[in-house]
Amino acid sequence: MTTTEFATLRRSIEQLRQSVAVVRSAFGDAPEVRRLVNDLERLEIDAAELLSAEPVRQVRTPGRVPEHVVVPDTPLDEAMFSDADDEGLGGYHGDRS
């Protein structure tokens, strides 16, 4: 990142800080507001760490085209999921119809 890009990032974080302050004045110390404040602090920490970090350079092989993976639009075979749990539903077992 260039110095200009870092300056833009810092300005954006400052604008976000002002917006979060407005939200905090409207909603008080609600859990959602506390999470926003925490996220903002994390952004500031990460941005500061980026200033001293070395960018990771990806090695590109000249003339090499990245692999293109085609994902079909056809429905998947339901049998593939017959013994799988539905995440977030507490391990539902039984008839899925």
Image (spheres, helix red, strand yellow):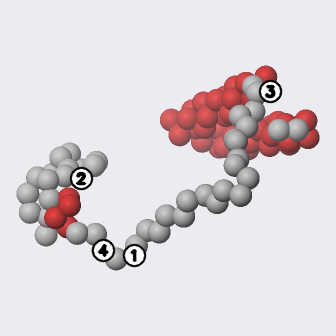
Asked where in the image residue 95 lies, by quadrant, the reply is bottom left
Left of 90 or right of it: where is 51? right
Left of 36 or right of it: where is 61? right
Amino acid type shown at disc 2: Asp
Q: CA distance from mark 4 to mark 1?
A: 7 Å
Secondary structure beneath disc 2?
loop
Q: CA distance from mark 1 to mark 2?
A: 21 Å
Residue located beneath label 1 in the image: 73
Which residue lies at the image location 69% right of the left edge and 41% below the top edge? 58
Check residue 75 in the rendering and tell me which mark sits there, or answer none: 4
Alpha-carbon neighbours of circle 4 within 10 Å: few (<14), some, or many (≥20)?
A: few
Q: CA distance from mark 2 to mark 4?
A: 18 Å
Residue located beneath label 3 in the image: 51
Q: Of circles 2 and 4, which is in front?
A: 4
Whichever of callouts 1 and 2 sits on the residue coming sooner in the sequence is 1
Residue located beneath label 2 in the image: 86
Q: Position of residue 15 (x, y in %)?
A: 80, 42
Q: Are marks 1 and 3 in contact (CB under 8 Å)?
A: no
Whichever of callouts 1 and 3 sits on the residue coming sooner in the sequence is 3
